[in-house]
Image (spheres, rainbow, N blue to C red):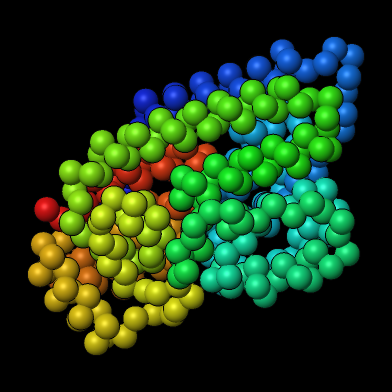
Amino acid sequence: MSQTISDRDGRRCFATHVGTAAGLALLACAPQGKEAPPLHVVATVPPLAGIVDRVAPGLAEVTVLIPPGASPVTYEPSLATVREAARAQVYVSVGHPAFAWEAAWLPDLLSDSRARLISGADGCQVRPDDPHVWLSFSCARNMAEGIARAVTEARPEFADSIASALAAFLADLDDVAEHADRALEPHRGGSFVVLHPAWGYLASAHGIEQVAILEHGSGDAGPGELAAIVERARRLGVRNVIVQPQFSAGPARLVASELGGDTVTLDPLGRDLVLTLLTAIDVLAEQVSP
């Protein structure tokens, strides 16, 4: 039986409190008597939309192109999705060259759009083979700042409240980064096994090795590849395999069974980035080999 890491009660309360406080702050700081229609923002994946939620609460109507649970490897946008992208005023993209979905679809989606484009990979140090840029603290900060600038340009009358919301979100990221240092630094030099290599930014920042069954954009692993992963995991002292909801866990279950372990579900595409990072940090601290 696989283990599913659920939201920890304390973290859920923390995230809800922060989101509610940011929304109330925005309402409190809004210029009296001024109303504006919601800014139409389109984001490629849920975590990018979540950053918009935090930086511009109450100001943006956010459409996510790759919905929760869908795999970025296989998802194809519908006609309605194409229309949503075309009317965007701000588009928040992953922006990483290894993110094949955007390479295939984004030029056409934005061909008739005048949207201000915010790229998640701009202005930060990215891993060449890892498009999960929102899981990098520095990239997440840059995205939040870029989104805040774009929303402020479109709604300058809310500049003060946007600045306050941005500052609160960046402070939360700083707190989570400090938690990562405390929780993961003791495991420097250790390893963990994943089905899909989503956690490279957290791993590399703390000297932890991520061993992946699949590579980015690859299909199923063959018997020889699975056997090699099992042998390597045994040498490293790893028993469990981290999986994510967007990919079939079949290969991971085979590896975990051979290791006498289990699969552990961890979602890198949750909309609440602070909660995603907090959960991931604690899961990795539990799963990294000595």
Name the residue at 66% across, 17% down. Answer: 25
As rendered, which of 117 and 81 lies closer to the eye? 117
Residue 101 seen by the camera:
yes
Rendered position, 268 above or below 55: below
Residue 9 shown left or right of residue 93 in the figure: left
Report the number of discs.
0
- Against 93, is 274 above or below? above
The image shows residue 135 at horizontal and vertical percentages of: 46, 50
State the residue at coordinates (79%, 25%): 158
Nearest the camera: 178 or 79?
Answer: 178
Q: Quadrant of residue 260?
A: bottom left
Of the 4 image quadrants, the one containing the N terminus is bottom left
Residue at 44% across / 43% down in the picture?
276
Q: Residue 229 in the image: x percent, y percent?
A: 22, 75
Position of residue 252 measured from the top left corner of the image (x, y, whole percent):
29, 68
Can residue 264 be seen in the rendering of this structure?
Answer: no
Report whether 257 appears left or right of 125. Answer: left
- 43 versus 99 height, above or below: above
> Residue 166 in the image: x percent, y percent?
62, 31
Instruction: Quadrant for residue 275, please give it.
Output: top left
Residue appearing at x 32%, y 34% in the figure: 179
Placement of 56 over or under 31, stated as above or below: below
Residue 56 falls left or right of residue 45: right
Splitting the image into 4 quarters, where does residue 247 fall?
A: bottom left
**Left of 73 or right of it: where is 78?**
right
